[in-house]
Structures are given as C-alpha cells and as structure tokens.
Image (cartoon, rainbow, N blue to C red):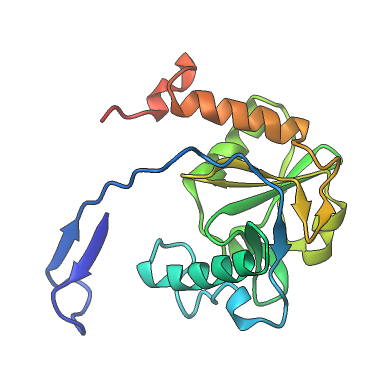
Amino acid sequence: MQVTRADLGHAAGQPAHIHGRVSLYGRTVTELAGVVPAPALDAAARRQRTGVIPARGKVAGAYANSSLIKSDAIQSGYDEALVLDQNGHVSEGSAMNVFMVRDGVLITPPVTDNILEGIMRRTVMELARKELGIDVVERSIDRTEVFIADELFFSGTAAQVTVITQVDHRPVGSGKIGPIAGKLRELVENIVRARIPKYTDWNVEV
C-alpha cells in the first residue's frame, strides 16, 4: 500500500492518493552463507538516523539506503549486510530484522537502535517465548558479538526466518542452521500456511 500526495509541498491532512500493489515473491531464501557486517566507515552502510527518516515507518525513500547497502554487499561477494546504527551497533539487515542466539537466549536490537518494528520480528519473539519457552531480550548488539554468536538469523515478511551461517567468511556457531532458528523457521512456515489451528486467526484469506 502506498500513499502519495498530488503535489509536493502538501501538508499533513491534505487529500492523498492511495495505491494498492501486490508483489509476487519467489521461493523464500532460508539460509545465507555469506553475510558481511557493513563497514563502519562506509556512510552508505549506516542506517539513517530517526531524525532523517523515521525507522519505524515503511517510508519509500528509506529503501534507497537499503538498496545501496544490499548492492554493496553483493558486489563485495556477500549475500547480505548487517547494518549498523549511528553508534556502531548492529541494527538490521538491509531490509530485515536480525536476531542472535547466545547461551540459549534470543537477543534482538531494541527499537531505539533505528530498527523497523517489523510484524515478523514481533511474531518471532512471541513464538520463541510461548512455543520454545526461551528468554527473549531486546538490547544492543555489538558489531563483534556476531562473531561469537551461537546462532544468527534475519526475519521479515518475505524472508520469514532466514538463517545466517557465515559472517565475513567466519562460520556462525557450527556453520549450519541452529536448533532455535530451525524450530522458529518451521513454526513460521507452518503458521503462514495456516497449518497450526491455534494460530489461524493470524491468517487472512485473500
């Protein structure tokens, strides 16, 4: 869904045009073998500050930042990038939320680290607590922490749960899909396809 104003300069409250759009996605990527932390000195590799474009909104212009980051990662031989906020903490992927597992605890950056408050992020957190019975902590993730993580994965509407097995040519944990990410990925896969009766109220038939 896109909302645009007829003319540049229109203030809030003025008439707007609403456009509906359907996007078809191919087979969901479930594992990324090559991920690089965005270089700290590369301006394009930083998530824009909230004072520039609010991170909480799916603002079309904000995706220019994501596009540059993803392009740089691919041109450097990686599949994705870990984006840093203005303080050098891990914020997101180019357009996905990120989760890390350490010592059985699921950790994800807080909303104050310039992240999009994604629906799938909230879904993963709820499933981890209710279905897996594990602790979920929202806190900043240091750039170098990802090198000692047990598991690392992205979440998003299209990505669902996409496991990261390498960061900057270093294996994450065993270098394979970990048990927590694997269970969450299976849960999400079944829920979005309405295979689990108690979660069918999360689905809308179209």
In the image, residue 128 sits, relative to residue 66, either above or below, namely above
Instruction: Residue at 15% x, 80% y: name it.
Output: 7
Residue at the image point whose x is 55% and y is 77% from the top: 49
Q: How many marks?
A: 0
Whether residue 75 can be seen here: yes
Q: Is residue 13 left or right of residue 89?
A: left
Q: Position of residue 139 (x, y in %)?
A: 72, 56
- Please tell me which residue is depicted at 56% across the width and 65% down the height of the picture: 70
Q: Quadrant of residue 127?
A: top right
Residue 95 x/y as whole percent: 52, 58
Residue 175 vertical placement versus 133 (above, below): below
Check the picture and name the quadrant holding the C terminus: top left
Q: Where does residue 13 sit, x and y in percent of width and height?
A: 18, 71
- When the figure is inspected, residue 157 is found, relative to residue 180, above or below; the finding is below
Q: In this view, does 162 lie to the left or right of 26?
A: right
Quick one: 188 or 133, which is closer to the camera? 188
Q: In which quarter of the image is the N terminus?
A: bottom left
- Quarter-wise, where is residue 192 in the image? top left
Q: Where is residue 167 in the image (x, y as percent from the top left)?
A: 77, 56
Pick the residue in front: 104 or 66.
66
Relative to 63, 23 lies left or right = left
Q: Is residue 96 above or below residue 134?
A: below
Quadrant position of residue 17: bottom left
